[in-house]
Image: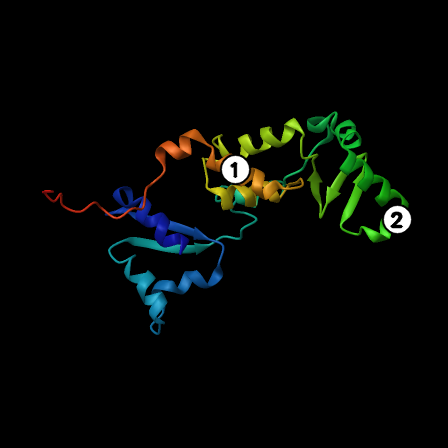
Amino acid sequence: MAIVLAVQKWRPYLLGRTFVIHNDQKSMRFLTEQRLMGEEQQKWTSKLLGYNFTIKYKPGVQNRAADSLSRRPRLNSLSVVTCQEWEGLEEELKADPRCLTLIQNIISRPNKYPEFQLIKGLLYYKKKLVLPKNSPRVTKIMNEYHNTAVGGHSGYFRTMKRIFTLFYWPGMRKDIQRFVEECTICQTNKYQALKPGGLLQPYF
């Protein structure tokens, strides 16, 4: 319950004082007046004992000061691959024999490749941007999603999952696994789950 968390956070300032809690849920006004409560309600209400407060209803539209960030409709997270970041990728795709053949087949027989799309010269597989296997961008992406603060030197599965949400290239699973296994920092700080060594025994 948000009320309990807020009161506990500001406990040093609220104890011994009378304060008002503004809430956008009408039924909360009767929280302290209810005689019959369920176990969960009793648990939360018991955490408010010892405080002198009243709960007043205030519609969410009017309560602009509270939770202002989450109420902003424009703050919807969206990952978008922009063309500016991928200048020259179209030429890379055409220079790669495997990708070029695939693009030509998609153009001539689009119904045979429903999982692929060509958008402004770029190739997509299941809405993921396709890269040539030997593209220098592959190493750059693996480095970004593993070695930087975004990647946090995560393990193979987590790194693979993050990259696979946006990109695709042939043999990417093996490439990512090899990249993670060859990471110097990961190998240096890797936890060794080995059994502790036994007591030394004299050898005669």
At x 46%, y 42%, the residue is: 155
Can residue 87 be seen here? The reply is yes
Q: Which residue is mark 1?
A: 178
Q: Find residue 135 and report its horizontal and vertical position in percent.
A: 67, 29
Point out which mark residue 157 bears. none
Q: Is residue 196 above or below residue 186?
A: below
Q: How many marks?
A: 2
**Residue kind at label 2, given as amino acid type:** Arg
Dot 1 falls on a residue whose secondary structure is helix
Left or right placement of residue 30 versus residue 10 in this view: right
Left or right placement of residue 101 versus residue 11 in this view: right
Q: Find residue 132 and report its horizontal and vertical position in percent.
A: 70, 34
Tell me where residue 44 sits by quadrant: bottom left
Q: Is residue 64 above or below residue 114?
A: above
- Residue at the farthest front position: 204
Q: Is residue 134 above or below residue 79?
A: above
Dot 2 falls on a residue whose secondary structure is loop
3D distance between C-alphas at marks 1 and 2: 35 Å
Q: Which residue is mark 2?
A: 109
At x 47%, y 37%, the residue is: 181
Can residue 150 be seen here? The reply is no
